[in-house]
Image (spheres, rainbow, N blue to C red):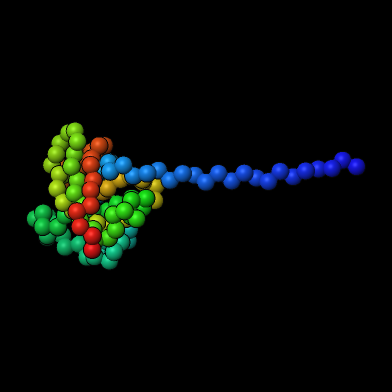
Amino acid sequence: AVKKTIKPAIVVAQKKKKHRGRVTVTQYNPVVLQCDEDPLVTADNSKIDLKKLERGQIRWVAVSRDLLDKYSYGNIIELTVVKGNKRINGRYIVHDTMNPRFTNRVDILTPVGAPMDIWSDVKIRKIEEV
């Protein structure tokens, strides 16, 4: 009789990429096509006041899920563009979460009709925890 040996499967844990303090930044509008069926309520249940958003009185962001353990809801973050248009530089409050397909990304809540852009090399740092 031939003796069969079964080799144990080798399980290799995928190493989680370490966040290096730089992200890609995009923008989103509070509309069903870019959010969900209730686009005026964020993931942390905050209500978006469209008039305040239009006036620039709220500066909120969504973060990709891989960043949520470092930048939690309510945290104040600072974004600094390394190269390119610096109009997004400043402080924002984390209120929302992005679709799971995105990683290492921050999405700025922007009024409908405002100019949209993408920034590929932006420094991010936590200013204050809540």
Q: Which of 117 and 93 is in front in this view?
A: 93
Residue at the extreme top of the image, as rendered? 83
Q: Which of 32 and 53 is in front in this view?
A: 53
Relative to 60, residue 19 above or below = above
Give percent across and percent down for residue 54. Answer: 12, 55
Quarter assignment of residue 56: bottom left
How many numbered circles are shown?
A: 0
Residue at 27%, 66% (x, y): give it.
Answer: 45
Give percent across and percent down for residue 71. Answer: 28, 54
Residue at 28%, 43% (x, y): give it.
Answer: 21
**Whether residue 100 is visible:** yes
Relative to 75, residue 19 above or below = above
Quarter assignment of residue 22: top left
**Whether residue 29 is visible:** no
Give percent across and percent down for residue 127. Answer: 19, 53
Relative to 118, residue 73 above or below = below
Residue at 12%, 60% (x, y): give it.
Answer: 51
